[in-house]
Image: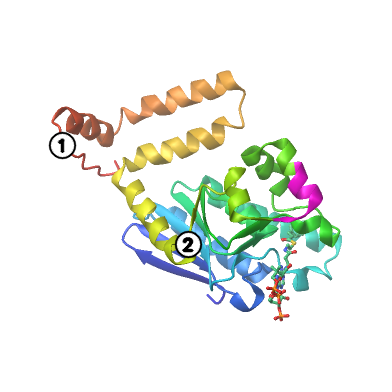
């Protein structure tokens, strides 16, 4: 693959969008490659955490590729949007925990990619934004849907309608970024968090992700029921038995992910 790099270290996979000359902008080839990598990782039961980042020190992803996009007709535009939406939904629903290490610009499709991840850690130089209206379009990779769910309707409208970029501090303040680190610390700290996730009951972690994602799209009573179902399912796992036994025996649990 040319534009997406995959590095696997034990149970952690690191996916790097690799078009630094175009600030890692997502053209259709990059989206297809990202889709292939995500599908492969989804099927890989050894992998428990996925980190997504951008190559270089300037950008996570500076958006969809404007050069490629400028000449699209309506049908081609729709096709591109469906391609990206499928890839981003696959990221959101994969059983592994996905962390975006936002190492610079996360604009347009880049901000939408970060929002499809479970958690966003940002470098101090990161900049977030949905500048689509400055190009005469609206966010089309689910930004109008994921942003209000993350930061609230009013702030999402301000960002999408105003089209301005915000810095990492502001992204942190509005809950778009979970944490801010110096650029050189971003990946080590992200890996540190990934290691922590690995030390937890991996099935429980995955169920928790599913409960939050699916429950947010249900009415509250159905969501409570759904949570109870998944809570019950935990008692069918070895991890639950080991976790509670270890607590009672005052030792650290050794989870097997089954
Ligand atoms: N696409 C293509 N190339 C890009 C790019 C992008 N999004 N962003 C940057 N580049 C390229 C620049 O053209 C430049 O290339 P060369 O001129 O060197 O060949 C190189 O990356 C370096 O960029 P700059 O020279 O501009 O670097 P600066 O530091 O001066 O500025 C910047 C950095 C991030 C502020 C600036 O590059 C910028 O404003 N970039 C555009 C950011 C942006 O507007 N992003 C949102 C894109 S719109 C759709 C659904 C969704 C979407 C689209 C369609 N469908 C329904 C079909 C999503 C849309 C978007 O994401």
The answer to which quarter of the image holds residue 8 is: bottom left
Q: Quadrant of the C terminus?
A: top left
Residue 249 x, y percent position in the rendering: 13, 30
Q: Nearer the viewer, residue 55 or 38?
A: 55
Residue 24 x, y percent position in the rendering: 62, 70
Q: Nearer the viewer, mark 2 or mark 1?
A: 2
The residue range painted magenta reads 157-165
- Extreme residue in the left direction: 249
Label for residue 182? 2
* Secondary element type, mark 1: loop
Q: Nearer the viewer, residue 43 or 18?
A: 18
Residue 35 x, y percent position in the rendering: 57, 61
Taking 241 as reference, is 66 above or below it? Answer: below
Residue 85 shows in the view: yes
How does the figure colour the protein chain or chains? rainbow
Q: Which residue is mark 1?
A: 251
* Disc 1 packing (10 Å; few <14; some 14–19; many ≥20): few
């Amino acid at each position: 693959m040319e534009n997406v790099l995959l590095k696997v270290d034990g149970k952690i996979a690191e996916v790097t969008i690799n078009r630094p000359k175009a600030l890692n902008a997502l053209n259709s080839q990059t989206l297809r490659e990202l889709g292939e990598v995500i599908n492969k990782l989804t099927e890989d039961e050894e992998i428990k955490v996925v980190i997504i980042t951008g190559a270089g020190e300037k950008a996570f992803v500076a958006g969809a590729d404007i050069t490629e996009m400028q000449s699209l007709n309506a049908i081609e535009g729709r096709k591109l949007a469906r391609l990206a939406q499928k890839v981003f939904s696959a990221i959101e629903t994969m059983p592994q925990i996905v962390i975006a290490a936002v190492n610079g610009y996360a604009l347009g499709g880049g901000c939408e990619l970060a929002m499809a991840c479970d958690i966003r850690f940002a470098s101090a130089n990161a900049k977030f934004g949905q500048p689509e209206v400055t190009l005469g379009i609206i966010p089309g990779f689910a930004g109008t849907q994921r942003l209000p769910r993350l930061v609230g309707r009013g702030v999402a409208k301000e960002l999408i309608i105003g089209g301005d970029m915000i810095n990492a501090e502001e992204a942190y303040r509005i809950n778009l970024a979970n944490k801010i680190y110096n650029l050189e610390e971003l990946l080590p700290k992200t890996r540190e968090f990934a290691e922590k996730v690995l030390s937890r009951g991996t099935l429980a972690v995955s169920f928790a992700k599913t409960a939050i994602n699916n429950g947010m799209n249900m009415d509250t009573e159905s969501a409570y029921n759904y949570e109870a179902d998944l809570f019950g399912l935990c008692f069918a796992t070895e991890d639950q038995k080991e976790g509670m036994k270890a607590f009672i025996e005052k030792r650290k649990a050794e989870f097997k992910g089954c």
